[in-house]
């Protein structure tokens, strides 16, 4: 039951509260570039969701099997030419960035070939976006978030399993899709507006993104509220992302003052 | 290679006329994410400068060996190696800053700015030109980052580099150091730059 609630909270956090685009600013390039038409934006979002899930699966497997200290595969291979106690603790986490970006790039290539061969319909709808995705920060960001929950975790119980990793990646992709589809809907309407000349194009898109981010800030604290509702007796140890990365959280802790207006959150 | 710009032209172009953030809209992810204060912004600018310089030099040295269909992979792996160096260096000597920047240092790997410079300049021109291009682009990126960070930090906390510049009774616009402030500031600054360009071109014609 606790596991199920944990999964649900990770999904909610990834999709809405800490939206990849509007909270972590990853995937801004397609958010500005490909958000002119709703169909294109939806295709891009689906392609990202697809690739991000595959990349999360690959990177979680590589991290637990090869990279972390005492991983089964690397210690097995090192056992052939190193003393036993050294081989058991071999630590390859320094290679993680190179391994991740290489696995993402090759995964994108294979997915493109596979989809083109076996699903021509699917390929015609989002195939054109697949090569662009290699350099989409959202994919690497998901891999790094999963890594931060697997590498260097003191308590082995807090280490993420494959289910949590895939949930984060899939719902992060869904959150990306939500943000980019809302954005493209607004931009289609914006074609009819009279925007001042210097603000046309990227500038107005970013300002709208800011207003959307303010709207998405309304979800802050929903996760801890739901958790307290469902599990009132256990102390809060949910592995939601907001507790793991305290970049902005010191400002969000209890209250937020926006332009002098005092808002109580929680 | 007569039509390629010289080293000095590359250097000057990177700073303002082809500013990576305001003119080319490259590398927006760190631009928005780490500019809630001057210190993280400058750390990020220095890391990007280091990676860009090293990657440009290495790519320029091996440019005659590159196969066209494999070049993007080579670019990314080169960048990833240097980003690992920068990340370990920050974690060793500036641990608090490395915690603050979190995943955004490794995300330099997929920063389009560096791949774009490798593709446009380093894979075609000599080492000296590539290095000066990297310096120019890095200075332009640093300028853009620090201008956004200055606006956000001063309005959001009333401080600049942690020193109070606005009066004590200034109501902090906390929204400016939160994620929406990044979008708003960059959007308005982009509009300002476009407006200045527009006035200049009107005056010229």
Image (spheres, helix red, strand yellow):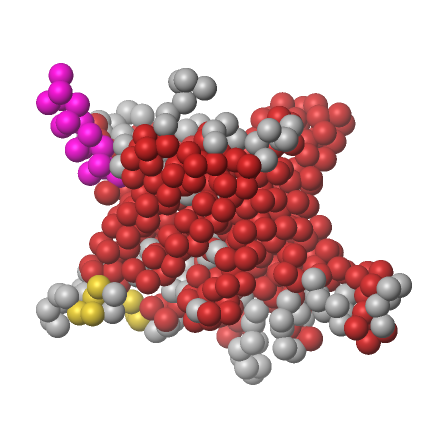
Residue at horizontal 42%, vertical 34%? B129
* Magenta stretch, residue numbers: B190-205
Label the magenta part by its dominant secondary structure. Answer: helix
Q: Nearer the viewer, residue A141 or A7?
A: A141
Quarter occupied by residue B4: top left
Question: Any magenta on residue B192?
Answer: yes
Q: Is residue A44 rendered to the left or right of residue B67?
A: left
Q: Is residue B170 rendered to the left or right of residue A210?
A: left
Quarter in which the N terminus of chain B is drawn:
top left
Picture coordinates of residue A28 (x, y %)?
43, 42
Q: Is residue A75 rendered to the left or right of residue A93?
A: right
Question: Any magenta on residue A106?
Answer: no
Residue A242 seen in the figure: no
Residue B120 seen in the figure: yes
Residue at horizontal 52%, vertical 60%? B87
Quarter in which the C terminus of chain B is drawn:
top left
Q: Nearer the viewer, residue A246 or A177?
A: A246
Compared with A94, B205 (above or below) is: above
Q: Nearer the viewer, residue A53 or A245?
A: A245
Q: Is residue B42 rendered to the left or right of residue A161?
A: left
Q: Exactly how many numbered labels are in the figure? A: 0
Picture coordinates of residue A55 (x, y %)?
66, 47
Compared with A79, A115 (above or below) is: above
Residue at horizontal 62%, vertical 38%? B74
Residue at horizontal 65%, vertical 28%? B67
Picture coordinates of residue A217 (x, y %)?
37, 57
Quarter occupied by residue A85: bottom right
Quarter occupied by residue B70: top right
């Amino acid at each position: 039951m606790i596991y199920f609630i944990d999964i649900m909270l990770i999904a909610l956090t990834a999709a809405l509260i800490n939206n990849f685009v509007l909270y972590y600013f990853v995937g801004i390039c397609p958010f500005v570039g490909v958000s002119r038409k709703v169909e294109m934006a939806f295709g891009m979002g689906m392609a990202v969701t697809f690739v991000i899930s595959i990349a999360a699966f690959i990177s979680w497997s590589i991290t637990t099997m090869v990279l972390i200290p005492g991983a089964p595969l690397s210690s097995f291979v090192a056992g052939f030419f190193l003393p036993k106690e050294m081989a058991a603790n071999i630590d390859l986490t320094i290679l993680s960035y190179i391994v991740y970006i290489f696995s993402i790039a090759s995964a994108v290539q294979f997915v493109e070939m596979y989809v083109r061969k076996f699903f021509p319909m699917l390929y015609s709808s989002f195939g054109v976006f697949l090569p662009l995705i290699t350099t989409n920060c959202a994919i690497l960001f998901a891999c790094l978030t999963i890594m931060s929950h697997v590498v260097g975790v003191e308590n082995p119980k807090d280490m993420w399993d494959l289910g949590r990793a895939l949930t984060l990646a899939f719902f992060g992709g869904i959150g990306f899709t939500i943000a980019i589809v809302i954005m493209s809907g607004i931009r289609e309407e914006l074609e009819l507006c009279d925007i001042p000349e210097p603000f046309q194009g990227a500038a107005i898109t970013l300002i709208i993104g800011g207003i959307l981010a303010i709207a998405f800030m309304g979800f802050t604290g929903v996760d801890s509220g739901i958790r307290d509702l469902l599990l009132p007796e256990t102390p809060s140890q949910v592995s939601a992302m907001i507790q793991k990365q305290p970049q902005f959280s010191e400002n969000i802790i209890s209250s937020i003052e926006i332009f002098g207006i005092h808002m109580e959150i929680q | 290679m007569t039509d390629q710009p010289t080293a000095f032209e590359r250097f000057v172009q990177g700073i303002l006329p082809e500013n990576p953030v305001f003119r080319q809209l490259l590398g927006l992810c760190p631009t928005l994410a780490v500019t809630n204060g001057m210190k993280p912004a400058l750390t990020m600018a220095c890391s990007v400068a280091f990676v860009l310089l090293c990657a440009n030099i290495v790519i320029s040295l091996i440019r005659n060996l590159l196969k066209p269909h494999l070049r993007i992979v080579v670019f990314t792996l080169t960048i990833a190696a240097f980003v690992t160096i920068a990340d370990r260096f920050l974690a060793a000597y500036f641990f608090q800053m490395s915690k603050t920047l979190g995943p955004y240092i490794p995300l330099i790997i997929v920063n389009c700015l560096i791949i774009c410079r490798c593709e446009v300049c380093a894979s075609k021109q000599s080492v000296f030109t590539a290095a000066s291009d990297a310096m120019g682009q890095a200075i332009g990126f640093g300028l853009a980052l620090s201008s956004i960070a200055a606006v956000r930090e001063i309005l959001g906390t009333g401080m600049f580099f942690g020193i109070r510049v606005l009066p004590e009774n200034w109501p902090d616009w906390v929204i400016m150091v939160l994620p929406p402030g990044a979008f708003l500031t960059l959007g308005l600054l982009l509009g300002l730059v476009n407006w200045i360009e527009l006035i200049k071109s009107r005056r010229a014609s």
